[in-house]
Amino acid sequence: MPELSNRGFEMPESPIRKLVPYAEAAKKKGKTVYHLNIGQPDIETPEVALNAIKNIDRTVIEYSHSAGFESYRRGLADYYNTFELGVSYEDILITTGGSEALLFAFNSCLNQGDEVIIPEPFYANYNGFAKTCGVNVTPVTANIENGFALPPISDFEKLITPKTKAILICNPGNPTGYLYSKEELETLKEIVLKHNLFLFADEVYREFSYDGKKHTSVLELDGLENNVVVIDSVSKRYSMCGARIGALISKNNEIITTALKYAQARLSPPTLAQIAAEAALKTPQSYFDDVTTEYVKRRDIVIEGLNAIEGVVCPNPGGAFYAVAKLPVKDSEKFCQWLLEEFEYENQTVMLAPAGGFYATKGLGKDEVRLAYVLNIDSLTKAVECLKQALKTYPDKTN
């Protein structure tokens, strides 16, 4: 057999999905597994989007424009401009999920061997996207002690080299749920302008901000029109993860023109999913109000429950639907596997994502896990109780 590529061997595994075989084995044994490992909401997709698919009136499922249907891009621009972001439909390129948008952004803006600074812990697939594009990730570490706030500007400055071309943030954050303030974004603006960098912002969770806090888009920052690229997606906003529709937004026409070449090479984003996504723009505000209220309830159940467990530390996230918790265990990956292989409480167990895979710095996150509070309150309550009981009996604790 011919040898596979070095790139294939170097491509990192997903820490979110690598324990799936153990979960499947646990289910075959009859255990109930509460999946807190992955951000798949159980919230219903808006009816208006589902109806658009059910009532489709087409005789051919044709290609769309490589940038996406113009009607959808115009509708999406109207959506952004309700937040006074000053976006034109020509600033938007529709992609196959937010993942493709970030791949297009990396390939359009960065050369082989260039460096992108990312606050860690970060969405684990950023590593894979960077590897695919030949880009090197330089982590700047955020700390659980202050809730994963933006690291000081001096920490960024120390890491900038002639190869540094961009900073990437996720706001609100996956995996931490941290919501950057406008003041923190202004700090990033200072660094970006001083060093002539691109600023990539993954804003797919922008609708989910809690406790009266407001999401600030990097598109609101004056003077960064040529530096900013926003990554967006319908996956979480409308609970449409399987639609695989995202967007790349930039007021820099050269970025859009360059990214369009990659879009043309893959022909077009999915037609049926664009129809659903365009229809979803008509989702009433009441939907988001109800969803936000529900997520706050779920968050409070999980965060309060976790922090009531001896030895557990879990900051209260300001957005998204994730949290990172520090556990009194020596190795969270071994603990997560043990939960699925050996533990049960009333024939139930929990699937978590070990946090080590969300860090680029080796050794960090070894005692941390990421949780996604995307299940109903009853399931989350039972999951927290399972975790409490598990930590009572786990043999390899730190205390």
Image (tube, rainbow, N blue to C red):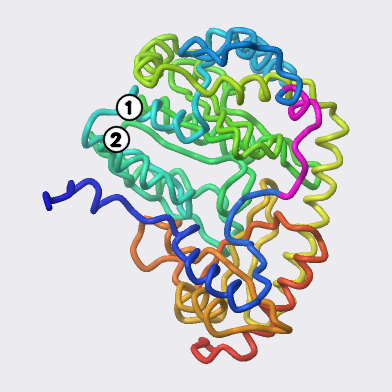
Q: Quadrant of residue 86?
A: top right
**Residue at numbered disc 1:** 107
Look at label 2 and name its amino acid. Answer: Cys
| Residue at the image point whose x is 70% and y is 54% from the top | 374
Tell me residue 196's x, y (percent): 36, 24
Badge 1 element: helix
Q: Which residue is mark 2?
A: 133
Highlighted magenta segment, given as a residue range? 42-52
Is residue 272 inside the magenta stretch?
Answer: no
Answer whether labels 1 and 2 touch (C-beta < 8 Å): yes
Q: Which mark is residue 73?
A: none
Judged from the image, the secondary structure of the residue bearing numbered disc 2 is helix
For this rendering, which residue is in front, 76 or 24? 24
Which of the 4 quarters of the picture holds residue 325? bottom right
Q: Is residue 248 left or right of residue 87?
A: left
**Quadrant of the frame with the C terminus:** bottom right
